[in-house]
Amino acid sequence: MSEVLTHWLMEYGYWAVFLGAMLEGETAAFLSGVAAHNQLLSYPLTMLFAALGGVFSDNVLFFVGRYAGAKVLPKFQKHQHKIVRVQQLIQRHENWIIIGIRFAYGMRTIGPIIIGASKVNPLRFFVLNIFGGAIWGCLIVSIGYFVSSLVLSLPFHPHFSWLVIAALVIVGIWWIRRNKR
């Protein structure tokens, strides 16, 4: 596993971090932090590219909501109660919602669409999204970095440490998907 990850990161580097953060979000940013800890990537640049990927995807989703929200949001029938709740919160706490929506469980993709459909000023969204994305990128990459640091400091064979990291990621993904229902 470590050889595959090493090859992938060495081949695509920060583009992999950027695209991974755009498409997968937390998992890619976390694993990029693990790679940074193992000196496959620069820690500061990894945080930057993860943040940029998150900001870019949120801006795209914001404009999807802004121009097609009325058509797109009804398709999320299972999440209508969340959509209504976020729309109410936007009315009262617009700035905080823009910054924090990426941290709200189950709202990573639909959140920016809802904000865009709420006719929030695009410039305001852009500026606050950069701020929120910077916090998100630094935090999630750092969690991966420090979890890797803790696991690799255990007195095990290095390959066993990678197995522990992989197991933690799998358990984390399982737990998140289990609690989505």
Image: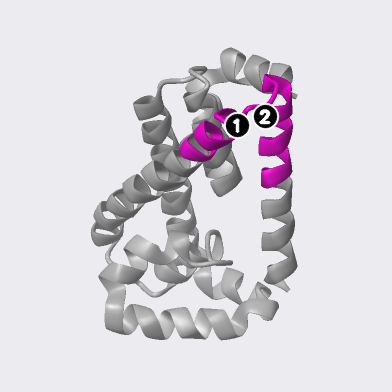
Residue visible at 49% across and 56% down in the picture: 61
The amino acid sitting under disc 2 is: Ser
Which label sits on residue 161? 2
Choose between 55 and 96: the one closer to the eye. Answer: 96
- Secondary structure beneath dot 1 equals loop
Q: Is residue 53 visible?
A: no
Q: Please, what is the dominant secondary structure of the magenta stretch?
A: helix
Q: Is residue 140 magenta?
A: no
Q: Position of residue 126 (x, y in %)?
A: 29, 53
Q: Are marks 1 and 2 in contact (CB under 8 Å)?
A: yes
The amino acid sitting under disc 1 is: Leu
Q: Position of residue 98 (x, y in %)?
A: 34, 64
Horizontal side, residue 77 vs residue 39: left or right: right
Q: Position of residue 56 (x, y in %)?
A: 43, 44
Q: Where 163 sits versus 128, above or below?
A: above
Distance Cα–Cα, label 1 vs label 2: 8 Å
Choose between 108 and 47: the one closer to the eye. Answer: 47
Q: Quadrant of residue 112?
A: bottom left
The magenta span reads 146-169
Q: Which residue is mark 1?
A: 154
Rate crowding at label 2 as few (under 14), some (14 to 19) or many (20 or more) other CA atoms within 10 Å: some
Residue visible at 28% across and 51% down in the picture: 131
Q: Quadrant of the N terminus?
A: top right
